[in-house]
Image (cartoon, rainbow, N blue to C red):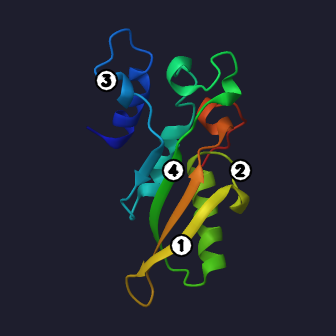
Amino acid sequence: MDAREFVRWHVRQSSEEKPELLKEFLRFDHCYMNLPVDAVEFCDVFIGLFKDANPEVWWRDQNDSSSIMLPLVHVYGFTFEKERENALKFFVDRIGKAMEYPSFSDKDVLEFHNIRDVSSTSHMYSTSFRLPYDVAMGEYQSVKK
């Protein structure tokens, strides 16, 4: 199954009357996007993903949508930028663009580190962030890529 299709299906399961997944597997806390060549581009799957999610599964308080327990997203990717600050800016810009969320910034990044230098010109990094509420609920003015 395509990764976008799978994550949409998984979240949709939480609202199904008879889900195919066991109750304890309906909610996930982390999403690892470990295909470094194009993982960032898959971040568009999160746009509005949780707007119809089941509050019994995803919310701490079923009467307060802001209490949603959104996953940590870990995105792996390559860059030509060797310096940490330049690499961070590169990934922040790409992730924000993929989620059509111009407010995404380095302040949203919880962890950023070099995995390894693949060559003298290619560097693999991991960027971790909590999925922004506005992206998850699709409640923002998106910008086209």
Residue position for label 4:
73
Q: Is residue 62 above or below residue 144?
A: above
What's the mark number on residue 113?
1
Kind of element beneath mark 4: strand
Kind of element beneath mark 2: loop
Residue position for label 2:
102
Task: Give the x, y percent position of residue 143.
Answer: 67, 43
- Looking at the rendered image, the disc whose residue lies closer to the viewer, 2 or 3, is 3
What's the mark number on residue 22?
3
- Specify the farthest residue to the bottom: 120
* Amino acid on which the number 3 mark rests in the picture: Leu
- Looking at the rendered image, the disc whose residue lies closer to the viewer, 4 or 2, is 4
* Amino acid on which the number 4 mark rests in the picture: Val
Quarter of the image where one finds residue 4: top left
* Amino acid on which the number 1 mark rests in the picture: His
Q: Nearer the viewer, residue 79 or 69?
A: 69
